[in-house]
Image: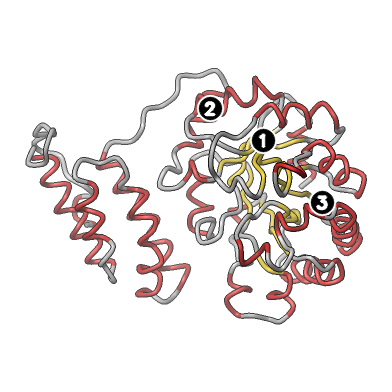
Amino acid sequence: MKHVIDALESSYTPLYLAPQAGVSESPFRRLCRRFGADVVVSEFVSAAGILHGNERTLEYLRFDEEERPIGVQIFGADPGQMAEAAAFVHETFGPDFIDINFGCPVKKVVKRNGGSGCLRDLDLVRKIIRAVGDATPLTTTAKIRSGFDQATRDPVGIGLACEEAGAEAICLHPRTRTDMYSGHARWEEIRALKSAVSIPVIGNGDIRSGEDARRMRDETGCDGIMIARGSHGDPWLFSQARAALDGRSIPPDPTVEERFRICLEHARNAITFGGDAERAVIEFRKHLGWYTKGLPSGRDLRQELFQVSTMEEMEDRLQSYLERFLSGELPGVRSREGEQLVGSTV
């Protein structure tokens, strides 16, 4: 992780794929790395689940060497459990860093005082960071929100507490827990945090285009940028963000054919990684919804795709749609004769 911290402290602005439950699986992480993500983070994992040896929980910790540098994000409200879980992750899986989740707003996490629930008690935040930092030689980072609610909104105070406890980098999503994902992320709070702490600050929130990434860097002075929901069905956002940050022309969105090729590659890798083909396809349906967002007659296509249970069915539905798209049969679409999806592989 040292070279990533070095990058955060240089003029280079690394791009991170955010930890996202049910999204940041290994196949998607590898895809985002290929499109330009500099660092990826696992789905957030329960410390209690790790220590109980929960089989599904341990699946979330698997990664391929090509994904490095990679962090594993853990959550929990018991410093001792968090320390034990961090030590187990280090010894068993060997990621590059451990990230602590103080940002998840989901009710089932918060009701156990995990995720953003911890932000109601900064002494607890400090204890967790110290415990995790003492448990492994790995870099310890933290992901936070601006507060639990408007009354406790204090991103600078939270960030200073994390730094004091030993966090070596901090990522801020400038919304409170009660904001969930509504409204606009307050990027000015990222700028304020950057001015207040001496450790690297990673900005997160409302990055949906390459230009958004450039604006966040320029407006906040952040050391790195984390992309979350903007990456859903859009892994090429990383290449667009990198171009914008480097001052190059931003590449256009892929064509429908290219989008479907990427989608099918992602699906095949998900099946290979998961082992259980039917379960993998069913779990992949959410990605199908994202990959087809904004397409002509996309709602009808999604209704079909949300019923598929095999790779063959998925390929057939996408190929059928593409043929109608290219022939101009869909409303508002001109014919583009001679083009096809992926030739003999579909």
Q: Residue furthest front?
A: 151
Q: Residue at x 75, y 54 (%)?
A: 97
Left or right of residue 296: residue 55: right
Judging from the image, what secondary structure is the residue with disc 2 in?
helix
Residue 212: mark in rendering: 2
Left or right of residue 76: residue 237: left
> Where residue 244 appears, x then y in whole percent?
53, 23
> Where residue 4 appears, x then y in whole percent?
73, 41
Proximity of marks 3 and 1: CB atoms separated by less than 8 Å: no
Q: Can you tell which quarter of the image residue 312 is in?
A: bottom left
Distance in Å between CA atoms under marks 2 and 1 = 11 Å
Residue at label 1? 203
Which amino acid lies under the numbered mark 1 shown in the image of this protein?
Gly
Distance in Å between CA atoms under marks 3 and 1 = 18 Å
Q: Residues within 10 Å of mark 1 (few under 14, many from 20)?
A: many
Q: Residues within 10 Å of mark 2 (few under 14, many from 20)?
A: some
> Where residue 271 appears, x then y in whole percent?
40, 68
> Where residue 285 appears, x then y in whole percent?
35, 61
Which amino acid lies under the numbered mark 3 shown in the image of this protein?
Thr
Which amino acid lies under the numbered mark 2 shown in the image of this protein?
Asp
Residue at label 3? 139
**Front position in the image: 329 or 260:** 329
Q: Earlier in the sequence, mark 3 or mark 1?
A: 3
Q: Can you tell which quarter of the image residue 59 is in?
A: bottom right
Could you tell me which quadrant the C terminus lies in?
bottom left
